Amino acid sequence: MRNDPLPRLDTDAGMRARLRPYCRLAAGEVWTDHAAGHRVACLDAAAAASVETMMGGEVAHLAVQDPPYNLAAFGQKRPDEFIEWCTKWVANTSRALASDASLYVWLGADQNNGFQPLPDFMIMMRGFAEFAARSFITMRNQRGYGTQANWMAVRQELLYYTKGAPEFEVQYTDIPKLVRGYYKDVEGVRTENLERSRSENIRAGNVWVDIQQVFYRMEENVSGCYAQKPLRAIERIVRASSKPDDLVVDFFAHSGTTLLACERLGRRCYTADIDPVYCEITIRRLERFRALGRTGWQNGNPFEVELAREAAIVNTPEAGVTAQTSLF
Ligand SMILES: C[S@@+](CC[C@H](N)C(=O)[O-])C[C@H]1O[C@@H](n2cnc3c(N)ncnc32)[C@H](O)[C@@H]1O
């Protein structure tokens, strides 16, 4: 089996620099998709003018935001600095949203550092009067850390806020309802829970145990990306809190999961990342899905063609190199 992964791009500045010439976008530029009306922008989510340029006067019905979590692994700021930065992109998100809209934020709590930044973020959000706190969702990862001397850390936190009164559609899992016997009298008739149900399956609720975390053996895996969210999770959010043709925004694109979910579900997506390499990966993931129906690269990578070409050039006799050069 072919195995052609990229290294983790956040910890390999050399590889990021090598990929830059293959990226369509530079800071401040916006790529527009003429087929379905999506946009990908290379911008700082905290910069109001850049976000305004991407939005072009439009407003969205849903924002799915997945910022860096302020953990040591992702370049840590002081908690107060991190929250100060969050107020800026949340304010930009608010301006980008319609009067009836939903906001979802993925964020972590560092158990080795006072559980920051999740509680700080929740308190900060109380200052945004237009956003009502609606739900605190936990998605269970299959793999975790700290397994020997502590409870294994397997949670991914997801906050749900609404602005105005957006629609919400209940989402069901694939897990069948097994337990009967929750009785209730409905118009004088004793009914059991399964009779009253709208689905044979259980609702997703605010603890998601049915979504597989992305790992390298999955088709949707985008190698090089270190913080990819499962497509199923983002599709659940998009289905619950938007309608076909609605505009969805995501200011932290990374592997472009929100864009792909929107493409698959018939929504438009305006998404951004501060790093041109992730912007390019986001665009390529969409293009690959359209061309081949694939959701990721699994054992390949988004730049495999260019990197293979580089390797071939390095290995030609004219280049004076005879030894095999390994790229990875
Ligand atoms: C946690 S990842 C998002 C993962 C994404 N939901 C996915 O499924 O692939 C965070 C991303 O935010 C980007 N980022 C960090 N600071 C940013 C900023 N100020 N503005 C925009 N993007 C930023 C990083 O480059 C990284 O790609």
Image: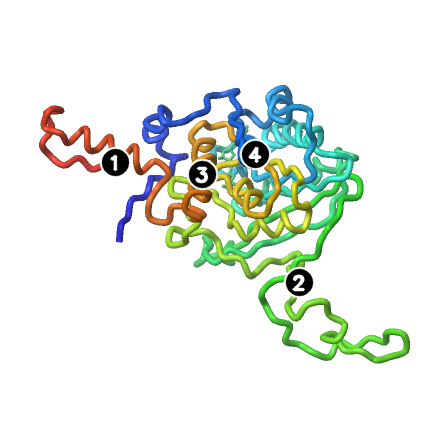
**Mark 2 or mark 3, whichever is nearer to me:** 3
Q: Position of residue 137 (x, y in %)?
A: 64, 52
Tags 3 and 4 touching, CB below 8 Å: no
Check disc 2 and give the amino acid type: Arg
Q: CA distance from mark 1 to mark 4?
A: 30 Å
At horizontal 13% and vertical 24% (from top left) the residue drawn is: 319
Image position, residue 55 (x, y; %): 64, 27
The residue indicated by pointer 4 is 38
Quote the CA–CA distance across marks 3 and 4: 12 Å
The quarter of the picture where the N terminus appears is bottom left
Disc 3 element: helix
Residue 64 circle label: none
Q: Amino acid at mark 1?
A: Ala
The circle on residue 287 is 3
Residue 189 relative to residue 299: left or right: right
In this figure, which residue is indicated by the disc labeled 2? 203
Going from N to C along the chain, the mark reached first, 3 or 4, is: 4
Foreground tag (3 vs 1): 3
Disc 1 to disc 2, C-alpha distance: 46 Å
Which mark is drawn over residue 308?
1
Colouring method of the image: rainbow
Location of residue 23 in the rendering, given as x and y in whole percent from the top left corner: 40, 27
